[in-house]
Image: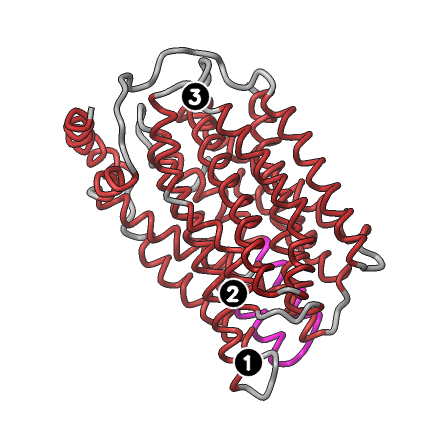
Amino acid sequence: MLRKRIQLGLLHMAVAMTLVPINSTLNRVMIKELALSATLVAVLASFPYLFSPIQIAIGSFADRHPIMGFRRTPYILIGLILVVAGVMTAPQVAFYMADHPVLGILIGILVFGMWGMGFNFAAVSYLSLASEISGEKGRSRTIAVMFFMMISGIIITALLLSRLLDPYSPEVMVSAFRLVGMLALSLGLIGLIRLETRSATPVLGGESRQSVGTLLPLIFENRQVTLFFFYLVLLLAAILGQDILLEPFAAQAFHLPVNITTRITSIWGVCVLFSLVIAGVLEGRIAKRSIARFGGLGAILAFLVIVFSGMILNLSVFYVGVVLLGLATGVASVSNLSLMLDMTVEGRVGMFMGAWGMADSFARLSGSVLSGAVRDVVSQFATNPVSGYLVVFSLQATMLIVSLLLLRKIDVSLFRQEARALSVVERAAIASEA
C-alpha cells in the first residue's frame, strides 16, 4: 500500500508542479513586467475552471465504463498530457499577447483551456482512485502522503524556477517552463505504472448515460452536499484566490525582483509541509471539523497580517503573514480533503469526487477573477497602488469567516443517510435514460 500511496503522491505532485509556473511566476510577469490587466490575467488563468462541471460527468462515466479494464488510468494519462502541454506553451502565449492583444487572448484561451481541461481529467480520476484504493480507514494517511509529496514538489519547483530565472529574461523563462513540464510528465508516468488493478467489471454496470445536467440536480438534492459544496467554494476561493496577487503585491509594495518573489512560494510550501505533520498528529486525536476550523482561523489571521504589512510597508511583517498562511493552508487542506473523501459513497465515488472537484475549480475561477477585478477597480480610484491588494486580502478574510459558519452545519453521517436515499432516485433516473 505504501508504494501505491507514493505513486498517487507522484501524480498529485506532477499536476501541482504545472500550477507553480502558471499561477506564480507567469502571472507576476504578465501583471508587472508586461503590464497586462490583473483582471485579464485572472480571467485567463481561471478560464479553464469553467470546464469544472465536466468532472462530475468524467467521474460518473468512469465509475461505469472501464477502458481496457482500467477505470481511472486512461483519464489520468489524458489529463497529465494536457497539463504538461499547457504549461510548456503558456509563456510564449503571454509574450505574444503583449504584442498582439486580440489574437493573443484567443490563443491564450485555447492554451489555458487545455491546461484546465487536463487538470479536470486528472484530478477527479486520481482522487477517486485514492479513495477506492485506500478504503475509509486509510484515507487520511493516503491524503497526508499525497499532500506531503505535492507540497514538496511545489517547493522544489519554486526553488528551481527561482534559480533558473536569475537573471530573468523571456528566453530563460520559456526554457524553465519546458523543463518543469518534462519533469512533471516523467513523475506522472512513473506514478501510473501498475497503480490501478485491471478489472473489466463496472462498479454500477450497464450502459447508462448521464449528462451533467441530469447529475447536478441529483447530487444537490442532498442538503449536506450543498452545504459542503459552498463551504469548499468559499474556503478555497479565499485561500487560492491570493495566488494570483501575492507575488505582484510583493513586487509592488516592496519592489522585489522576479527571482525573489518566486521564492515566496517555497517559503509558503515549507510552512505547509510543517503544518501537514501537525495535522497528521492531530487528526487521530481531534475531530476533522475542529482541525478544519483551526486552519480557517489561522488563514484569517494570516490575511490580516498581510494587510497590516501593506499598510505599514514592512517586508518582515509580510513574511510573517506568508508563514502563517502556509501553516494554515496545510492544516486546512489535510482536514478538508479527508472530509471530502468521507463525503462519498461506495459505487459513486467518481460522481461525488467530481462534485468536489467542481467546487475546487469554481473556487479557483471565482477567487482569481474576483481578486483581479477588485484589485483593478480599487486601484483606479485609490492614490496608493497597494490599496487594491489590501482590499482583496481583507475580502478573502471575510469569505473565510462565512465559510467557518457553514462548516458548523456539516455532518458526514447525515450526508451518508441522505446519499443512500438519493441512490434510489438516481437508479430511477438511470433507468429512464437507458
Sequence-first tag of 3 and 2: 3
Sequence-first tag of 3 and 1: 3
x, y percent for residue 173 = 76, 53
The quadrant where residue 386 appears: bottom right
Q: The disc labelled 2 sits on which kind of residue?
A: Leu
Mark 3–mark 1 Cα distance, whole angstroms, equals 49 Å
331 lies left or right of 199: right
x, y percent for residue 398 = 41, 68
Where does the C terminus fall, quadrant-wise?
top left
Q: Which mark is residue 71?
A: 3
Residue situated in front as seen by the camera: 30 or 262? 30
Q: Helix or strand or loop: what does disc 2 sit on?
A: helix
Mark 3–mark 2 Cα distance, whole angstroms, equals 42 Å
The residue shown at (45%, 70%) is: 395
Sequence-first tag of 1 and 2: 2
Q: The disc labelled 1 sits on which kind of residue?
A: Ser
17 lies left or right of 206: right
Q: Helix or strand or loop: what does disc 3 sit on?
A: loop
The quadrant where residue 207 appears: top left
Q: Which residues are magenta?
A: 304-326
x, y percent for residue 257 = 77, 66
The residue shown at (52%, 43%) is: 279
Q: Which mark is residue 379?
A: 1
Q: Residue furthest right?
A: 167
Please tell me whether mark 3 or mark 2 is closer to you in this view. 3
Q: Residues within 10 Å of mark 3 (few under 14, many from 20)?
A: many
Where does the N terminus fall, quadrant-wise?
top right
